């Protein structure tokens, strides 16, 4: 029971990182049907931004995270403007290859500028471990969980309560009809990229603090796992992405706990395939009917 | 088949001329070991990308797991030729690889081909990763260290001949009755079903066929490079093959050839740039996609048949 509780805590903290990343995937996919392969690399850039502002400018944690979110949001908008916007009406596979190209560019550009070496992330917050009934829980884990939940709540409010959020939902249902009722598609898509990338930036700073190490290729595997999480939750659905992220995090730590850590990725993909077969649109996805 | 005999024969002649040309260059010393290595890589990439183009371009199914089937072929050769180090052993291992890859494709394909578009891509990617992780943890495959000192049973000539063979077989498959069934599923699944074509069956046929060619590519890769590790067959490897297909033009076998040659040459030229290499490569990829979204050749196909009809048409206009 004790190990179970412990794994639950570890799984939830890892899962909240995946959930934050998955939100970006799910929103972008929901609105322009693009698997944004470069999303994991935006998360990496967020972590590097945090590293530099804390080391060079001596920002505290809150400012580091907020500035990383703003930086990543701008970056997401710029990438969308230059790489994805010209391809909005081309085949989707072309846009996908462009996204892969952007991902390669960010990874290799960072490797070129800062070498491929692993750096240790400055520990701006002193780790304190609390003991609660035999369970160990660190303040960093609480911080990750709290920040992630707060950001998800904020996102849900933006999407459901603001005008821009309503525009986002409208564009994802039918871009042309949205245009007819006076929604500026370009602004809405840019805004979506900004929101998703800001979430990734926050996740980057949080993971730097949690794992204490960052490198230019750190975004690749979590990026793909977060996409898997978005698919499991039902792509295009915001609550689905959160649930999917937590599910993947729990699954991974659970498989590790029973001593099969070599197979943890295989189990994640296996669960993905099974869920897609049982619920082809994911847990929260809408099933679309085939039209003749 | 007989109707296409003339065109197949013309292609065979082109291939023989190509073979003689490369052989002559080799003999004259124009092709050194470095360029030969590049040509073999291009040849293997053509085999892999042709199979993937059949799946993506002609059956319209988006597979992101080609490297998994390639890994099966590579490991079949790697393991078997260590005990039977003869050319016969190599071909035997290739056949075993193809059979296992096809069985794996059946197991993966039957459930997942019901999914559509991006969901299928993610499911096949997951399946390929599962294959890779299994290889990474099995004893017979020597785990993460991989296999080395695989007997060098493949020369450039073997790769060339197999490349021609798989291309001829694939193109004839596409132009057969079965190929037309596959393309009709791509165009409109419901209409195809109404015409009495079983969509799942033909999608599966293309998928299994593609997996078989991937295994051939993997076998050649293992025997030529002589070292394989599970890390060689990760998602990035699948993406590299996908890039060739999309860059050349989805649904154009000629395009696949052009893209494989262009990328192979680009890779060799960029070797001199050191760490800048991947930056230039990725920029080139983004720019080509933005300015030529349908790939270098779109779905244009070089074909003797069309050349012939084109000329005849012109003649009739002149008359």
Image (cartoon, coloured by chain):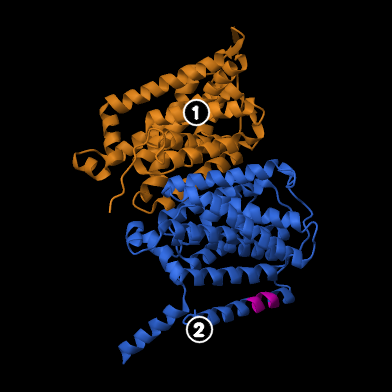
Q: Is residue B166 left or right of residue B189?
A: right
Residue extending furthest toward the bottom = B319
In the rendered image, is residue B268 in sight? no
Front residue of B49/A281: it is A281
Chain B: give its colour.
blue
Tell me the magenta residue range.
B19-24
Where is residue A146? Give x, y as percent.
47, 17
**Chain name for mark 1:** A
Residue B70, given in percent of the width and then of the height, sits at 62, 55
Query: Can you say which quadrant of the picture contains the N terminus of chain A?
Result: top right
Query: Which element carries disc 1, helix, strand or loop?
Result: helix
Residue A107 lies in the magenta stretch:
no
Say which of B306 and A3 sits in front: A3
- Give me the residue at 45% from left, 58% from top: B201
* Image mark for residue A247: 1
Main secondary structure found in the magenta portion: helix
Q: Secondary structure at mark 2?
A: helix
Tally of marks: 2
- Residue identified by numbered label 2: B6
| 3D distance between C-alphas at marks 1 and 2 | 59 Å
* Chain letter corresponding to the colour orange: A
Quadrant that contains the C terminus of chain A: bottom left
Q: Is residue B203 left or right of residue B276?
A: left
């Amino acid at each position: 029971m004790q190990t179970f509780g412990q794994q639950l805590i570890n799984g939830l903290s890892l899962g909240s990182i995946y959930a934050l990343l998955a939100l970006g995937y799910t929103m972008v996919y929901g609105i322009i049907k693009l698997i944004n392969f470069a999303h994991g690399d935006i998360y990496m850039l967020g972590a590097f931004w945090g590293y530099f502002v804390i080391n060079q400018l001596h920002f505290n944690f809150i400012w580091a995270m907020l500035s990383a979110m703003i930086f990543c949001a701008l970056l997401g908008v710029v990438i969308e403007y230059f790489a994805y916007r010209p391809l909005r009406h081309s085949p989707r596979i072309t846009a996908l290859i462009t996204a892969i190209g952007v991902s390669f560019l960010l990874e290799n550009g960072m490797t070129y500028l800062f070498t491929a070496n692993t750096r240790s992330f400055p520990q701006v917050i002193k780790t304190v471990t609390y003991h609660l009934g035999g369970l160990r829980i660190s303040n960093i884990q609480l911080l990750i969980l709290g920040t992630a939940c707060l950001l998800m709540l904020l996102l849900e409010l933006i999407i459901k309560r603001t005008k821009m959020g309503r525009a986002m939902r409208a564009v994802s249902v039918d871009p042309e009809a949205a245009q007819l009722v006076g929604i500026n598609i370009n602004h809405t898509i840019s805004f979506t990229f900004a929101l998703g990338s800001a979430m990734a930036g926050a996740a980057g700073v949080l993971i730097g603090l949690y794992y204490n190490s960052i490198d230019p290729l750190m975004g690749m595997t979590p990026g793909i796992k977060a996409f898997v999480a978005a698919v499991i939750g039902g792509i295009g659905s915001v609550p689905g992405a959160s649930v999917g992220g937590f599910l993947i995090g729990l699954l991974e730590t659970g498989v590790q706990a029973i001593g099969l850590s070599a197979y943890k990725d295989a189990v994640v993909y296996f669960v993905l395939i099974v869920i897609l077969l049982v619920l082809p649109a994911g847990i929260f996805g809408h099933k679309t009917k085939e039209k003749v | 088949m007989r109707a296409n005999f003339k065109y197949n024969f013309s292609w065979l002649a082109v291939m023989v001329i190509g073979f003689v040309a490369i052989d002559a260059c080799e003999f004259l010393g124009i092709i050194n070991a470095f360029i030969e290595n590049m040509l073999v890589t291009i040849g293997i990439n053509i085999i892999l990308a042709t199979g993937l183009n059949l799946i993506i371009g002609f059956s319209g199914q988006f597979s992101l797991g080609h490297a998994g089937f390639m890994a099966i072929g590579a490991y079949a050769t790697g393991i078997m030729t260590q005990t039977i180090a003869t050319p016969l052993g190599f071909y035997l291992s290739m056949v075993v690889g193809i059979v296992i890859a096809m069985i794996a494709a059946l197991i993966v394909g039957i459930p997942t081909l019901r999914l559509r578009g991006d969901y299928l891509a993610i499911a096949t990617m997951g399946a390929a990763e599962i294959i890779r992780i299994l290889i990474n943890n099995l004893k017979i495959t020597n785990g993460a260290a991989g296999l080395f000192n695989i007997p060098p049973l493949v020369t450039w000539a073997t790769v060339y001949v197999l490349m021609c063979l798989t291309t001829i077989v694939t193109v004839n498959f596409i132009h057969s009755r079965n190929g037309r069934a596959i393309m009709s599923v791509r165009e409109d699944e419901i209409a195809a079903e109404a015409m009495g074509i079983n969509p799942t069956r033909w999608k599966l046929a293309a998928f299994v066929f593609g997996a078989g060619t991937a295994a051939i590519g993997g076998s050649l890769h293992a025997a030529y490079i002589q070292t394989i590790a599970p890390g060689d067959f990760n998602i990035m490897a699948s993406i590299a093959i996908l890039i060739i297909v999309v860059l050349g033009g989805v649904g154009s076998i000629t395009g696949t050839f052009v893209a494989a040659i262009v990328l192979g040459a680009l890779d060799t030229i960029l070797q001199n740039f050191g760490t800048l290499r991947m930056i230039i490569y990725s920029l080139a990829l983004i720019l080509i996609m933005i300015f030529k979204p349908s790939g270098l050749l779109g779905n244009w196909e070089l074909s003797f048949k069309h050349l012939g009809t084109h000329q005849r048409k012109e003649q009739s206009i002149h008359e």
